[in-house]
């Protein structure tokens, strides 16, 4: 006993029918099987655009990933059997579903239209689909192509990097999408640099001015760009700009300041001649705020005047500068007449001192007149 598998019409469509036949399969059954296969496989005569015969599938379908795609096939009353195929796989035959994919559903099965829908289209759904019909004469096919568009997505990007000034840096940004996305780079630190169109962005001999955030953008015609950032840290030795000498009177407060630009942030040391100054000794205070160091004298003495050396240090090098603390001369008489209302000019003189002296003379004169 042998099994012979044939395809026979069932409920208006096509379905498998397994029958037990004694001996070998008869020739008529084999012929029937061949005819059914001829109908289902898209080997029929394709319908050109100039022909008016059916079936007529729609034009190519362009759909975004995740959206639904509807495949429509126009037919007429002369069609006796219909089917949709994806390459060599049967999706639907009549109203019978052959595909195991739950996303494939039938939409319309009428005398004039035979349509199916693919829910949540993905990239692997892209490709040709065939509407195959059986007429009274012979099978015919019409083909439609699904084109799946995919929004751009950055799948691999360089991590933030820390390099020494003068090094070469290569930033990478890889993206996928359909159509293939365009990848661009730009430097976000002001002023914003022009775009560089490439997946790889090379910087030769990087400088401290080129440090900061770099933005990678991947875009295509499907949706807005996917954007990611990479931070580039450039290490460089300390640099101390010009410093200002400071004047202070004996007994007054004086502050020397030293500021350095450096990455990593520098540490500071203060010296007078060859002697290093320590915080809290001899009535001084050394305090660091960010990239600035301040040396404070709370009660300046004659011995405090002179040149001081500020040294900024990080792992890449050192830098130093000299700062002078000098004695600021003031008039003793004018200083005694400085009151809450006195106004100081640019040379620290009280412009109201002379007026106060005149009033004092007037008061003394009146006192003596009343006494005598």
Image (cartoon, helix red, strand yellow):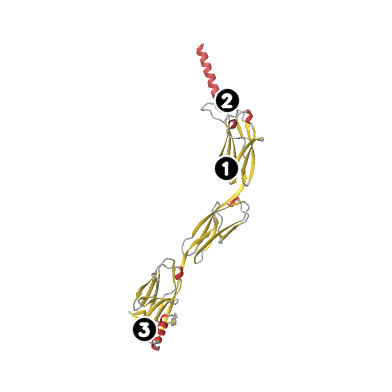
Residues at badges 1 and 3 in contact (C-beta under 8 Å)?
no
**117 displayed left or right of 168:** left
Q: Farthest residue toward the right?
A: 274
Where residue 240 is drawn, which disc sits there? none
Q: Residue furthest top?
A: 372
Q: Position of residue 350 (x, y in %)?
A: 56, 28
> How many angstroms separate mark 2 from mark 1 (CA)?
39 Å
Please rate how many residues cluster around mark 3, counting C-alpha atoms within 10 Å: few if below 14, some from 14 to 19, many from 20: few
Secondary structure of the residue carrying tag 2 is helix
* Above or below, comparing residue 133 to residue 299 in the picture: below
In the rendered image, the vertical position of residue 147 relative to residue 230, given as above or below: below
Q: Residue at x 51, y 12 (%)?
A: 371
Residue 40 at least partly seen: yes
Residue 20 image label: 3
Mark pair 2, 3: CA separation:
129 Å
In front of the other: label 2 or label 1? 1
* Mark carried by residue 291: 1
Q: Residue at x 49, y 59 (%)?
A: 226
- Which one is nearer the viewer's eye here, 97 or 62? 97
Q: Secondary structure at mark 3?
A: strand
Tell me residue 28's x, y (percent): 39, 88
Mark 2 or mark 3, earlier in chain: 3
Q: Dot 1 lies on which element?
A: loop
Q: Earlier in the sequence, mark 1 or mark 3?
A: 3
Q: Quadrant of residue 134?
A: bottom left
| Res. 241 in view | no
Q: From the viewer's perspective, is residue 183 above or below residue 97?
A: above
| Residue situated in front as seen by the camera: 349 or 200 | 200
Write down the residue under mark 2: 334
């Amino acid at each position: 006993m042998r099994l012979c598998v044939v395809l026979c019409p069932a409920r208006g469509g096509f379905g498998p029918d397994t029958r037990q036949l004694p001996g070998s399969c008869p020739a008529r059954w084999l012929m029937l099987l061949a005819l059914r296969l001829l109908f289902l496989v898209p080997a029929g005569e394709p319908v050109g655009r100039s022909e008016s015969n059916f079936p007529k599938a729609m034009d190519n379908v362009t759909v975004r990933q995740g959206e639904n795609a509807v495949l429509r096939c126009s037919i007429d009353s002369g069609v006796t059997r219909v089917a949709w195929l994806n390459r060599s796989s049967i999706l639907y035959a009549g109203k019978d579903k052959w595909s195991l994919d739950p996303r494939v559903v039938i939409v319309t099965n009428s005398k004039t239209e035979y349509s199916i829908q693919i829910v949540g289209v993905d990239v692997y759904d892209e490709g040709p689909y065939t509407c195959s019909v059986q007429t009274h004469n012979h099978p015919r096919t019409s083909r439609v192509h699904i084109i799946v568009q995919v929004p751009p997505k950055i799948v691999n990007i360089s991590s933030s990097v820390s390099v020494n000034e003068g090094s070469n840096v290569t930033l990478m940004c890889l993206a996928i999408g359909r159509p293939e996305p365009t990848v661009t780079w730009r430097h976000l630190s002001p002023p914003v640099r022009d775009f560089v169109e490439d997946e790889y962005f090379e910087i030769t001999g990087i400088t401290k001015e080129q440090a900061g955030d770099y933005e990678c953008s991947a875009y295509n015609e499907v949706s807005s760009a996917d954007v990611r950032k990479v931070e580039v840290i450039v290490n460089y030795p300390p640099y101390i700009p010009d410093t200002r000498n400071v004047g202070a009177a004996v007994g007054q407060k004086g502050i020397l300041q030293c500021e350095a630009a450096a990455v990593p942030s520098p540490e500071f040391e203060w010296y007078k001649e060859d002697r290093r100054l320590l915080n809290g000794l001899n009535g001084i205070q050394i305090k660091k705020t960010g990239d600035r160091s301040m040396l404070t004298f709370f009660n300046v003495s004659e011995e405090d005047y002179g040149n001081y050396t500020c040294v900024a240090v990080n792992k890449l090098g050192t830098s130093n500068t000299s700062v002078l603390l000098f004695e600021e001369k003031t008039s003793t008489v004018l200083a005694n007449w400085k009151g809450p209302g006195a106004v100081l000019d640019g040379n620290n003189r009280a412009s109201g001192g002379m007026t106060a002296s005149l009033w004092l003379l007037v008061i003394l004169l009146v006192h003596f007149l009343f006494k005598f």
